[in-house]
Image (tube, rainbow, N blue to C red):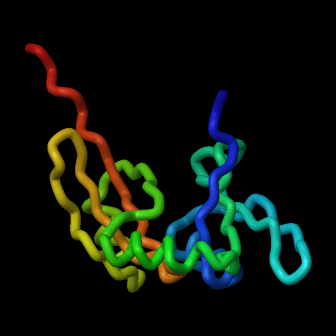
Amino acid sequence: MRIQLTSIFVDDQRDALAFYTDVLGFTKRHDVPIGDDAWLTVVSPESLDGPELLLEPSSHPAVKPFRDALVEDGIPFCQFAVDDVAAEYDRLGRAGVAFTVPPTDIGPAVMAVFDDTCGNLVQIISTKPAPSDE
């Protein structure tokens, strides 16, 4: 069993595509019209055949209260791995991304949380190398 696809609810698929590709750096994988919406996915440019992130329309009535509660409590909807949280914080900050949590050392990792402009909080994280037993 492996993860092939996961999704994130977005307020506007076209705005989300621009943010997730132009700002975050993901690559568009699928863009298939389905009525007023699309089957719209992005992937990491480092793993073009890897797991896809579906930019899912947030029109279902259960989505708004769910996402509002997560944002109000400061809980990220999803998490992305990065090599260096501080470097991504600087890069994304220069691109105008608003962080709700700056780079924070949490012991075995460093994390930060930002607003994806599409209704979600997203966490980035980089794990620290395991201490050597030398």
Question: Where's residue 109, x and y in %?
Answer: 24, 45
Q: What residue occupies the far left of the structure in this picture?
A: 134
49 sits to left or right of 79: right
Give the camera-side residue of 44 and 124.
124
34 sits to left or right of 50: right
Relative vertical location of residue 116 with respect to residue 54 in this rendering, above or below: below
Relative vertical location of residue 52 with respect to residue 28 in this rendering, above or below: above
Q: Quadrant of residue 42?
A: bottom right
Quarter of the picture containing the N terminus is top right
Q: Quadrant of residue 95?
A: bottom left
Residue at 67 percent of width and 68 percent of height = 55
How many discs appear?
0
Relative vertical location of residue 79 with respect to residue 71 in this rendering, above or below: above
Question: Where's residue 122, x and y in %?
Answer: 42, 65
Q: What residue occupies the far top of the structure in this picture?
A: 134
Residue at 76 percent of width and 67 percent of height = 40
Residue 89: in sight, yes or no? Answer: yes
Residue 21: in sight, yes or no? Answer: no
Quarter of the picture containing the C terminus is top left
117 sits to left or right of 21: left
Residue at 45 percent of width and 54 percent of height = 80
Residue at 89 percent of width and 73 percent of height = 33
Give the camera-side residue of 1 and 26.
1
Relative vertical location of residue 60 with respect to residue 8 in this rendering, above or below: below
Give the camera-side residue of 130 and 61.
61
Question: Where's residue 104, x and y in %?
Answer: 18, 59
